[in-house]
Amino acid sequence: MIDIIIPVKGRPSKLGRALHSLEEQTYTEFEVTVVNDHSSQEERSEISKICSEYNGVINLIDSRGTGAPAARNFGFQKTSHPYVLWFDSDDMLLPNKLEHDIQLFKSNTFDFVVSRAQHLVKGELIDQYWGASPDADKGAFQFPFQTMCALISRAFLVNGNIKWNENILSNHDWEFSNECYIKSDRNAFSNVITAHYNVPNATSGSIGSSLNHIKIESQFMAIENIAKLQSKFGFTTGLYSKMRILRHRLFLLNACLKNGYYLYFMKSLNRLF
């Protein structure tokens, strides 16, 4: 049995589309938990109405914390099935998603399995994807999977003490996916496309739609947390990963200048290396 956990903050119309994609799944052994992340009272009422119209088992609960990571963790605490899929309300699962992933999971003893999500930009599919097989350095500083790409064993998460980082606003999924790979020697990747990732833009209202001071700091923190985790588990960073993370730090410093965060830019220069 699979627990599907969907954090939602406003945007009830997009939640309806996400739930419709669950109604079309060829594998039906799952339950849905929608975690309301402090939406307005009017939006909460609309979310409740959409959930009541869903054709299946669904639970609507209100998050105790604030932000998507807290909502995901709270949903995890309130569910108990052996497999977990976190799924954002503005994305869509293809009908084969759950059946494909559970069959792959049961073909061996895995901690988690990853399949691909194709990018959707303004309603049009483009030739870009989330989900990849990490290279020899255990996926460090890569972005192996977006939220909906991975079906994960609950036992693996509990035993590894793996949670969503509630202290950062942006790139918590980057940190989470790296932690899963660093702590697991039993996982599988499939090239099969099983979801559509709705790429955020300036009008989407998504956490990833723009950069501000808090999001820039969150991404710096994600980089540093991944580095600490690697060091703790004895993994070295390859040249490719070093160059990748240097490029990302330069991008963040440039974002500071573009947004006029000059004092923060000066304070963050020591994070370049």
Image: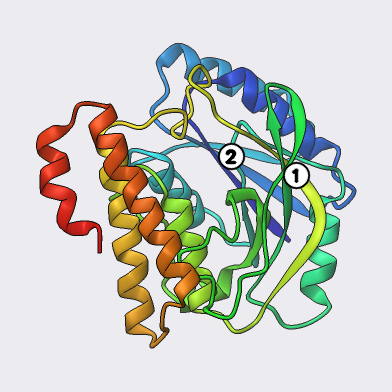
Residue 201, how many percent across, how many down? Answer: 53, 24
Say which quarter of the image contains residue 11.
top right
- Secondary element at image label 2: loop
Q: Name the spot of residue 186 as percent of width and height, x first.
A: 65, 82
- Local packing at callout 2 (Cα closer than 10 Å; few below 14, some 14-19, many 20+) is many
Q: How far is the residue under mark 2 from the one under mark 1?
A: 11 Å
Tag 1: amino acid: Ala
Q: Nearer the viewer, residue 218 or 248?
A: 248
Q: Is residue 166 visible?
A: no
Q: Does any portion of residue 240 appear in the rendered image?
A: yes
Task: Give me the disc on residue 141.
Answer: none
Which quarter of the rendered picture does the N terminus lie within? bottom right
Q: Position of residue 34 (x, y in %)?
A: 57, 38
Q: Tell me: residue 17, above or below residue 60.
A: above
Residue 30 location (% of width, % of height): 74, 52
Residue 146 vs residue 234: left or right? right
Q: Secondary structure at mark 1?
A: strand
Which residue does the image show at 43% across and 33% down from the upper left? 207
Q: Is residue 105 above or below residue 87?
A: below
Mark 2 or 1, closer to the camera: 1
Disc 1 designates what residue? 195
Residue at 60% in and 57% down: 145
Q: Mark 1, residues whose alpha carbon is within 10 Å: few (<14), some, or many (≥20)?
A: many
Give the amino acid at mark 2.
Asp
Query: Quick one: label 2 or label 1, which is nearer the N terminus?
Result: 2
Q: Which part of the image, by quadrant, shows the C terminus? A: bottom left
Residue at the spot of label 2: 88
